[in-house]
Image: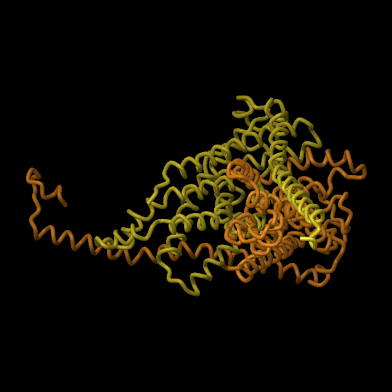
Amino acid sequence: MEHINEEQVKRRRNLRLLTNRVAQFIFMLSTLFGVIVLGILIYRVVSQGIGWIDINFLTGKLSTEPERAGILGAILGTFWLMVVVVPITMILGVGTALFLEIYIKKGRLQSFLQTNIANLAGVPSIVYGVLGMTIFVRALDLGNIVLAGGLTMSLLILPIVIVASQEAIRSVPQHLSEASYGIGATKWQTIRHIIIPAALPGILTGAILSFSRAIGETAPLVVIGIPALLIPLPGSIFDKFTVLPMQIYYWTLDASLVEEYANLAAATIIVLLLVLFLLNLAAIIIRHKFKKIY
Amino acid sequence: MKKNNHPTKTNPLNVKELIEKGKKTRKVSQKLEKIIPFILLSITAVSVLTTLGIILTLLTETIHFFNIIPIWDFLTGTVLKPLNKVPEYGVLPLISGTVISSVIAMIVAAPIGLMTAIYLSEYASEKVSLVVKPILEVLAGIPSIVYGFFAFTFVTPLLREFIPGLEAANILSPGIVMGIMIIPMIASLSEDAMSSVPDIMREGALALGSTKLEVTKRVVIPAALSGIIASFVLGISRALGETMIVTIASGSTKNFSFDVTQSMQTMTAYIVEVTSGDAASGSTIYYSLYAVAMILFIFTLLMNVIARYVSRKFREEY
């Protein structure tokens, strides 16, 4: 063993081990970076806005005076927006997923439709806004009402709902539907009584997550032209409206004029994040509670 | 059926009637069976119509715009002053703003996202992953408007402590925050790619005496490279299309420069500015927003196609 310099081998090995340690530490710091930023973000928003949240803020109308301003209009607007978005995306999303997974044969058409949906999922939300403004607001002359905003949002989140539903449908074990066909059920009967019930938790989880995307999305609504003015509370899907993120947007923009607006924006962010948190919690509960093991 | 046969029923059905009834329901369900595929087909058509709608609206209005402003002037013009008496429409300031903000975002997101992915896939214990992954999911689920608020009220003031020349509206701060927003996406996509590298390959390298870092560098990353690159490309696509952060924190100065301490407008922010300023339908400035949206659409579509191509074409199958 004279030809091997033991000292050198040892030194090299120690160096390699040390590099590994240092690298591991850096990787850990990077991972922590995201966690820390999230912590700072939430701390900043909560410390700035929590003092402004009270019953008057939640049930008050918009006002130019920061002390009297409330977000009931925005909460109702978000609610009505969802009244449009939820049924449309559920029907279109699940319908498309069923067609792609069960009815269509593998081939050119199927891969075209699938590619199309993948591409739609990558289109920036603002482009959907431009589409909505052109088609729903101007061409169909709906104006900037809940329905126009809801239709635009539906198109925006549709690809996500479709993909999630497809995955849920695909994960229903084959032998269930085969058993159903075996006792003489038709395709639609199998879908209605076997596949949809079994895939429902997965479909709902994906759908709820995409609804929370729609609730937080701002850009398409800015393009559609949701006014910053004080408007009456929306009472149906044909009324003009504003939503929570729009309110945050306008208050943040105007924070350079009136400082308190930044606090109002922070308070609204707390409400928005709370809504999103509850939705995500619901999705997690559904996923765990109704998860069937076949 | 059973109920109808029950003897206590006042009007019991006989077998013949039952057969008739069965035939009827079968007819109905057979009809249903034929109709359903068409209903589902027309539902599926909505997503195709959406694509057509996007392309057609953008295309027709963009062509209108190029009838007023020559396409070459638009694509090579370095001055964008749509509100001047003699308006000038050059798109390069918007493109430079978009590219610069995306580059800043990727400088933040690519290394941190990749290192996070490495940590989660190669180093972290199961327990740590179970805690960190949901946190990253929360980070990914925060609406961009909240990040915009964060950039404007926290990151910009913080950066001004260190960079004295930084303007209140600048491209640096939204770029960084955009990067933070994209980290979870790159981390989770890259991590998926790395975890799908079979353990046998890692163990082989470890058995030869490699450290974990060497395994990661020489085995895992090369094997997962297509997925990692695809995640970067998707990250770029996301940054190009991001709207609210830049709209809030970068102002609306249409600068054609590369000074990141200044305010710059991106394509997305321009679309927001034009639509919020209720531009009359039919005016040149109104058409210009479609031309900008068209470029944005092409950019992001290209990125998505590239990402899919890379992840499919160069995937290593084991």
Q: Residue at x 55, y 45 (%)?
A: A81
Picture quadrant where residue A253 is located:
top right
Seen from the viewer's position, the closer of residues B126 and A141 is B126
Residue B8 in view in this figure: yes
Residue farthest along the front direction in this orientation: A2
Number of numbered discs on residues: 0
- Whether residue A12 sits left or right of residue A195 in the image: it is right
Q: Colour of chain B?
A: orange
Please give left or right for residue B226 compared with residue A169 in the image: right
Question: In the picture provided, is B273 more to the left or to the right than A53?
Answer: right
| Quadrant in which the C terminus of chain B appears | bottom right
Instruction: Tell me if I can see residue B274 in this picture.
Output: no
Query: Measuring 60% from the left and 33% from the top, which residue is drawn there?
Result: A72
For the residue pair B143 and B163, the one nearer the viewer reads as B163
Residue at point 78%, 69% (across, down) = B68
**Residue B95 to residue A84: above or below:** below
Seen at 38% across and 57% down, the residue is A173
Image coordinates of residue B102 in percent, x first then y, are 76, 56
Residue B314 screen position, x and y as percent:
64, 70
Q: Which chain is yellow?
A: A
Q: Nearer the viewer, residue A94 or B32?
A: A94
Determine the residue located farthest toward the bottom in the rendered image.
Answer: A108
Residue B280 image position (x, y, % from top left) = 72, 56
